[in-house]
Amino acid sequence: MGLIAREAESRGIPSVSLSSAWTISRSVNPPRMVYLDFPLGHTAGRANDVQSQRAVVMAALRLLEEARQPGSTVTMRHRWSGDDAWKDTVMRPKINGDSGEIFDDDRVERLATPQYQSSADADRVTENCRTCVWLEE
């Protein structure tokens, strides 16, 4: 997302990236970033935790308004758990306790072609689609 944010900024659109992957995000140098040390996919806080989600959104809006230097970052103080043990197993294949076998990666398959949530979304795509500027053939 940091690369998209940089492109948006180059076109005059201010942006803030939400991230839970510090090294990946810093390597692409987003214009502004709110970092939350949570598992991937939880960049705006825990599911159904309105209070922490609101805190992340408000931090992003403040950063958008107040940041004066490129690469400005806010690190949220929220914690996923009481310790960092969750980091030892995140993004690793799960092991079957009974057989000791490692399960395959359970993430969704990555495809080289765009994927759409519905056929109606796919039908809206045209050669001159202004929202598809990031896709290249």
Image (spheres, rainbow, N blue to C red):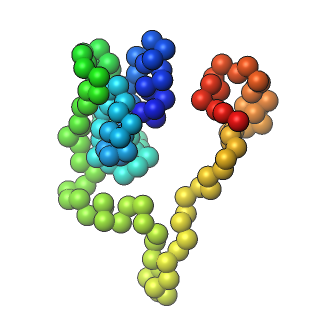
Residue 102 against residue 107 in the figure, above or below? below
Q: Quadrant of residue 82?
A: bottom left
Q: Position of residue 26 (x, y in %)?
A: 32, 39
Would residue 118 appear left or right of 78 to someone viewing this image?
right
> How many numbered marks are there?
0
Q: What residue sits 25% from the left and 55% below the top?
A: 81
- Image coordinates for residue 92, horizontal then vertical, percent: 42, 66
Left or right side of 90 for 75: left
> In this image, 62 relative to 116: left or right?
left
- For the C terminus, the image quarter is top right
Residue in view at x 59 percent, y 55 percent: 108
Q: Position of residue 38 (x, y in %)?
A: 32, 48
Depth order, front residue of 47/133: 133
Q: Quadrant of residue 123?
A: top right
> Farthest bottom residue?
99
- Residue plotted at (26% across, 64% down): 85
Q: Nearer the viewer, residue 26 or 58?
A: 26
Q: Residue 45: which quarter of the image?
A: top left
The foreground one among 73 and 98 is: 73
- In the image, taking residue 112 as reference, residue 95 lies left or right, namely left
Q: Is residue 69 above or below residue 94?
A: above
Q: Is residue 54 visible?
A: no
The answer to whether residue 40 shows anywhere in this view is yes
Q: Position of residue 112 (x, y in %)?
A: 67, 47
Question: Which residue sits at x=31%, y=65%?
Answer: 88
